[in-house]
Image: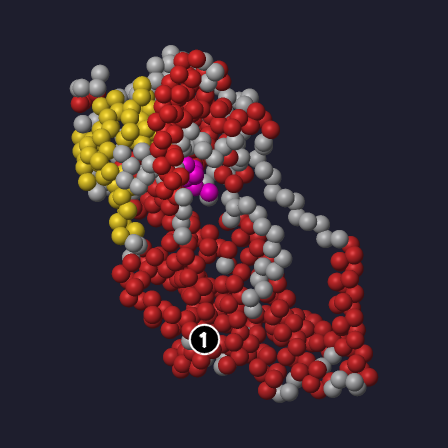
């Protein structure tokens, strides 16, 4: 049985469908983008200098930039950034693992899902910020109260995505794997887990964003270190420049993290057809 | 042939398949008796919604019958049919595995070593004409190429019987004929039993030794079994115009047409 089929019409004409090259940004768009930035920053600066907006409440870009440079030059910012990022990372890992395990359990065991469904809904409906004070009491002013707070945010995202990913796995793929000889454990490893991970990875931007939000908000409400603490300190002394500089550093860091997450996501989901998505992390 | 139960790869005795639907039970097929001899290529045809796939799922063990018995090689079937390979209507390829890993998947599940299963998988990939696409993911392939991967994935485990549920239904006509031809080439001389479900009478006759006709659903029964005595090996590109083919086609079609009409009358 020598099924030599190299030259069938359909294999010859279709190679693997290459991913579409990223759409090139047109120069006009780029120029306009720069123009908008220049207009806003320059307008702000001029208005502040001319006294049209109150410098006390709005600061001015040149001050914010020099403050930021100052932070980095003296190195005082690193300690705060490090704390915030460690808190976010811990919240991401712990919340992610909890969400994965519990999501899997509920998706696979109908009984547990039925029992816990109302509780999950109640917990998720709770505005998470109100948990911050109680976590401060329980875990103190150190990093763990912020981690706990971040975990409550990350957990639900990962949980719902895992639950969905396991439940909505393609029936045919499961049947096919079973017919090929997959036992329950192998089914979990080769079919259900990858399916759930797809959902989790596609929500990675949101999870990472929430982990950082959790850390910063937690610090803002009570801490001795971290970017959130820095901002809250500046606010306490009516130091508008410090508040803006903190915001500026924070959004720059989040952008860098976002790019890294993009890379990771593209690698992990390389088997998926690519989708153009301009506003990947627009949840915060 | 036929009377010795051991020679029968598959036997259905009074099989009824029912689903629990919202408005009471829905009986897909009722009281089906069917015997498939070992090494035969048997097609099941019938109008849309007559429960052809349900019969296949019963033989695969994916869906237990509500009544009756499924015998595989003379033994009552419990759980999944481990002797069967199943090709689904939509391919069940794992989208997160490459072509190579997909083809090797069945062997991986059995615990075959990586080097051994990769070697065998490469062999099969070449045999189905996909050499060079080992590292592609399913979404990068055309429909025909995905079918080829599915064929390799199913055949690599060397199952004694093959269950095929309209495997080429979604392909365009030309690709479909090519795939049918390759399936026959692959099958010839293997002694594998094939149960092939299709709604396309052309396809059924040109591939099979025997065509089984199911009546319109619900609660379909077997209307008749028609032997196809066309000589093998067959060239599918020419066979459809031969007078013998046309004669068999006409005989089955007159019965099938009645069932199709019933289906349409029911749907309105």
The stretch drawn in magenta includes residue B88: yes
- Above or below, A181 relative to A56: above
Q: Percent from the top left, x then y, of residue A168?
A: 40, 52
Magenta region, residue range? B85-95
* Helix, strand or loop status at disc 1: helix
Tell me which corner region of the image, top left, top right, bottom left or bottom right, holds residue A259. Answer: bottom right
Q: Percent from the top left, x then y, of residue B132?
A: 54, 29
Q: Residues within 10 Å of mark 1 (few under 14, many from 20)?
A: some
Q: Percent from the top left, x then y, of residue A22?
A: 66, 48
Q: Percent from the top left, x then y, of residue A56?
A: 71, 87
Nearer to the camera, B228 or B120 = B228
Q: Quadrant of the C terminus of chain B?
A: top left
The stretch drawn in magenta includes residue B243: no
Give the letter of the chain under mark 1: A
- Above or below, B210 relative to A187: above
Nearer to the camera, B185 or A33 = B185
Nearer to the camera, B92 or A262 = B92
Q: Is residue B140 visible?
A: yes
Q: Quadrant of the N terminus of chain B?
A: top left
Q: Which residue is mark 1?
A: A128
Q: Residue at x 24, y 33 (%)?
A: B32
Q: Residue at x 31, y 21 (%)?
A: B226
Q: Is residue B6 left or right of residue A82?
A: left
Q: Is residue A145 visible?
A: no
Q: Is residue B176 left or right of residue B117?
A: right
Main SS, magenta residues: loop
Tell me which corner region of the image, top left, top right, bottom left or bottom right, holds residue B11. Answer: top left
- Above or below, A224 relative to A108: below
Q: Residue at x 46, y 30 (%)?
A: B148
Q: Residue at x 33, y 60 (%)?
A: A106
């Amino acid at each position: 049985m020598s099924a030599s089929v190299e030259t069938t019409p359909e294999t010859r004409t279709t190679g693997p469908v290459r991913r579409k090259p990223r759409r090139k940004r047109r120069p006009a768009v780029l120029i306009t983008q720069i123009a908008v930035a220049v207009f806003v920053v320059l307008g702000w600066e001029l208005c502040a200098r001319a006294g049209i907006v109150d410098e006390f409440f709005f600061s001015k870009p040149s001050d914010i930039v020099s403050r930021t440079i100052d932070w980095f030059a003296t190195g005082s910012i690193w300690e705060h950034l490090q704390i915030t990022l460690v808190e976010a990372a811990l919240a991401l890992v712990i919340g992610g693992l909890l969400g994965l395990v519990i999501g899997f359990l509920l998706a696979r065991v109908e009984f547990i899902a039925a029992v816990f469904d109302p509780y999950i809904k109640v917990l998720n409906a709770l505005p998470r910020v109100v948990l911050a004070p109680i976590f401060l009491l329980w875990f103190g002013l150190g990093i763990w109260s912020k981690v706990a707070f971040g975990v409550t945010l990350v957990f639900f995202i990962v949980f719902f995505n895992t639950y969905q990913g396991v439940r909505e796995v393609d029936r045919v793929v499961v049947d096919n794997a079973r017919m090929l000889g997959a036992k329950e454990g192998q089914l979990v490893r080769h079919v259900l887990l990858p399916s759930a991970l797809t959902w989790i990875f596609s929500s990675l931007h949101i999870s990472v964003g929430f982990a950082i939000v959790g850390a910063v908000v937690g610090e803002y409400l009570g801490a001795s270190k971290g970017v959130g603490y820095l901002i809250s300190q500046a606010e306490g002394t009516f130091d508008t420049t410090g508040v803006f500089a903190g915001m500026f550093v924070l959004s720059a860091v989040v952008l860098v993290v976002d790019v890294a997450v993009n890379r990771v996501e593209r690698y992990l989901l390389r088997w998926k057809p690519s989708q153009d998505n301009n506003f990947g992390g627009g949840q915060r | 042939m036929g009377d010795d139960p051991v020679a029968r790869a598959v036997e259905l005795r009074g099989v009824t398949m029912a689903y629990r639907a919202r408005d009471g039970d829905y009986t897909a097929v009722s009281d089906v008796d069917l015997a498939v001899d070992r090494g035969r290529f048997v097609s099941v045809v019938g109008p849309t919604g007559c429960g052809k796939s349900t019969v296949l799922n019963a033989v695969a063990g994916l869906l237990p019958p509500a009544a009756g018995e499924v015998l595989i090689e003379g033994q009552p079937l419990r759980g999944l049919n481990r002797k069967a390979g199943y090709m689904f209507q939509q391919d069940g390829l794992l989208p997160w595995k490459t072509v190579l890993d997909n083809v090797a998947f069945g062997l991986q599940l059995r615990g075959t070593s990586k080097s051994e299963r990769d070697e065998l998988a490469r062999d099969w990939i070449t045999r189905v004409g996909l050499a060079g696409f080992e590292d592609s993911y399913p979404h990068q392939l055309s429909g025909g190429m995905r079918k080829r991967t599915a064929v390799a994935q199913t055949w690599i485990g060397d199952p004694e019987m093959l269950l095929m549920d309209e495997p080429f239904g979604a392909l365009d006509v030309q690709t479909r004929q090519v795939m049918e031809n390759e399936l026959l080439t692959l099958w010839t001389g293997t002694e594998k039993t094939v149960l092939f479900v299709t709604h396309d009478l052309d396809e059924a006759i040109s591939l099979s030794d025997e065509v089984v006709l199911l009546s319109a659903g619900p609660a379909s029964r077997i209307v008749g079994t028609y032997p196809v005595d066309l000589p093998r090996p067959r060239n599918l590109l020419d066979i459809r115009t031969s007078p013998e083919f046309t004669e068999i086609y006409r005989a089955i079609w007159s019965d099938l047409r009645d069932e199709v009409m019933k289906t349409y009358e029911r749907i309105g």
